[in-house]
Amino acid sequence: MDVGHDLERVIHGRRWLIVFDTLTGAKDVVALLQAHGAAGIAVVAGSRGVGEVPDTEVVPTFVLEMYRPTMMESLRAWGRLLHDLPEDVVAFLDEWDPDRAALVLGAGMTAATHVAGRRIYGPRRAEWMALEDKLLATELWAAAGINQAPFTIVAATADALARAHAEMRGPLGSVWVADNRTGWHGGAEYLRWVTDSTAEAIEFMAANAHQVRVMPFLDGIPCSIHGFVGPGGVAVFRPVEMLVLRDLSVPRLAYGSVATRWDPAESDRAEMRAIARRVGEHLRQTVEYRGAFGIDGVMTVDGFLPTELNARTSAGTARQLRSVPGCPVGFFNRAWLEGDLPGLDLEAFEAEVIRNADAQRSTRVFMPTMSPPLGERRMGVAIRSDTVVPAADESAGVMELGIGPPGAILRVDFAAGSVPPGPPLGPLAARAVGLADEIWDLGLGELSAAPDLRPRTIHPSSGTPAR
């Protein structure tokens, strides 16, 4: 797949404003715009982030140093800020782009069409953003003919929630998730895993939701499946493991991003892809949906059960598209929404993404912590007898701490050769996070990985033995 010509036509000779919550997130986009002849590039970021940043000597950059206690608070504050940027930021932009002709990349989950008087490139429709409500997902699965877990939706009152918990709880309790009363949410922040005591969960939901979906806790590997919708069909990609770790003492769930090391059984892979295709077709026909989407769920002992829809380019899509040469993740989706990739062959696109994503596995852990910004820390790690230990070099992996919107951000990158494909990455992710917590005192607690409850057979791209 070669979209280079289309990208050159779209990018060349235009000014581009990148508005990302972290400066590190802008690095690849800046490189893409520079490679295709952008007339000018500027960046406004909420915080530095962890990792490499663009060359600020070449690219005009404004970092707001904006921090909030949690990832959702920071994302929402960032969205509000983009509607009303500080005067010094607007002055910075107007000096760089006096006629306000630059196109904007970013703006995240806001419903804005402009930032500081400049048009957002490839915005999403309001009706697509509304699909992010976790409670609406139950209607979507039913309409698309997809099996789902038992659930009930109740008012966010103490009596209703206590009854729902007693009715829905399984061996590991129940899971509660809020509606979008306070706006879009993710990263499990508006989700509560409830076992015995319901007091904290009731207090949280009463303050943050009108209604709550309650379902049994689904044991198994949290995972997702992703696709891409066009006017004439749907491209569907490969399964992605979600690194959702467990603190059994609280209990609580901690989100550590996604990975593609894991290969489910061939039958489970096929079923997940069939579910994504049905959902994509349903979205295409009912709301004229376009672009990337993802379905989160759990690979339980009885197979994959979906829990929520992400109507956007989520982390699982991004990890797979990055494996394809010349396919610049977020910009690619925005160009599609803008109508600037008219010749894209969805069938060929699907085949190339799957081929490359199967061959190039993502083995990164990325976890916000509750710690205040601690500065930058970095060390090599190695895998010894299924555990993660400090190493003198970074040949097997690197563990890095940086500064992000919620304070400290932990990133662990395992070298591809040190973690062959097949098994889930979750157990190694939990051990790496535990090592970081021990060394840097991040307050993350005793985190463990979800169990793999399904029999798994060898996938052609995996060198692991059948089980």
Image: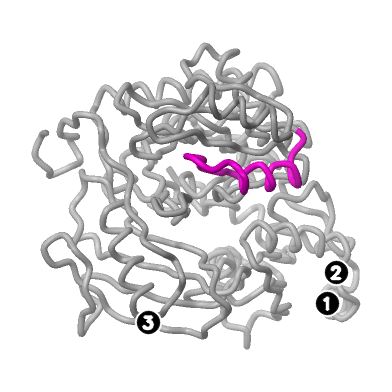
| Residue range of the region highlighted in magenta in the rendering | 191-210
Q: Earlier in the sequence, mark 1 or mark 3?
A: 1
Which one is in front, 257 or 227? 257
Give the alpha-carbon distance from disc 3 to disc 2, as whole Å. Answer: 33 Å
Residue 25 shown left or right of residue 441 in the figure: right
Kind of residue sitting beneath label 1: Val
- Give the image location of residue 57, x and y in percent: 62, 88
Q: In front of the other: label 1 or label 3?
A: 3
Compared across the picture, whether 405 is left or right of 82 comes to left
Rendering coords of residue 119 (x, y %): 82, 55
Who is closer to the viewer here, 268 or 352? 268
Q: Which residue position holds label 1?
A: 89
Does residue 318 belong to the magenta stretch? no
Q: Is residue 104 left or right of residue 382?
A: right
Q: Quadrant of the N terminus?
A: top left
Residue nearest the observer in this picture, 125 or 440: 440
Q: Crowding near pointer 3: few (<14 within 10 Å), some, many (20+)?
A: some
Residue 194 on the magenta segment: yes
Percent of width and height locating residue 69: 65, 67
Q: CA distance from mark 2 to mark 1?
A: 6 Å
Q: Which mark is residue 321?
A: none
Q: What mark, if any, has residue 85 been given in the picture?
A: 2
Instruction: Name the secondary structure under disc 3.
Output: strand
